[in-house]
Image: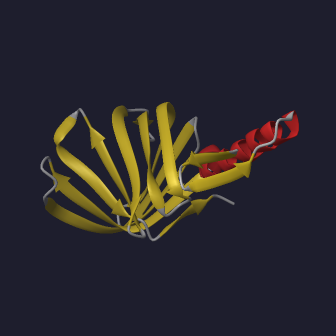
Amino acid sequence: MYCIILYKTYIFVYKLKSNMKSTFLALVLLVAGSTVSLAQCDKKVSLHSSKTQHLDGSGKQEDTADEQTIVDFDKSDINVSITNDDGDQKMTGKIKSYTCDWKVPFKEGKTVISTTLNNDNGEGRDFTITIEGKDGKVTLLAESPDMPDKKIKLDADKFGEKN
């Protein structure tokens, strides 16, 4: 008898015997495979971008800004640093909800973060931040219910585990 286990992009095939060793081995390999695919989701991650796109509510580009943006986050905290001709701006927040599903770490998948970002003056604004990797390109889209006609989009120059 054979046991075929499909998990995300992994396929495990085992010839089962009537003993516990085979069952235990299958379980261990399944857990190991799930740990590999979720490894990115448990780490501190950093996204770097050199251009910010300002979109209207329908996603049409209204403006672009050449500025260095760094977004660092894990499951509990998020930090955003923006450097442009007007100086530096920093925003921080605690993550309220976090979903993470990447088929290929840092290349193909999606993370959705719900947070309140507070600026240097302590003013806060709710955001839903979606980071999506598709066809080798990673983008970040930030939307706020306080500004339904405005969205912020970043194309990642660099996206990976924070050192």
Foreground residue, 9 or 94?
9
In this rendering, the answer to whether 90 lies above or below 75 is below
Any part of residue 118 in sight: no
> Is residue 92 rendered to the left or right of residue 145?
right
Mark count? 0
Quadrant of residue 31 in the image?
Answer: top right
Percent x, y of residue 20: 85, 34
Residue positioned 55% across, 57% down in the render: 46
Any part of residue 32 in sight: yes
Foreground residue, 144 or 65?
144
Q: Quadrant of the N terminus?
A: top right
Percent x, y of residue 4: 62, 47
Residue positioned 54% across, 56% down in the render: 9
Residue positioned 42% across, 66% down in the render: 156
Residue positioned 19% across, 47% down in the render: 150
Q: Quadrant of the C terminus?
A: bottom right
In this rendering, the answer to whether 96 lies above or below 105 is above
Residue occupying the far top of the picture: 96
Percent x, y of residue 69: 43, 61
> Is residue 127 rendered to the left or right of residue 18?
left
Percent x, y of residue 138: 41, 63
Structure colour scheme: secondary structure
Foreground residue, 150 or 85?
150
In this rendering, the answer to whether 144 lies above or below 87 is above
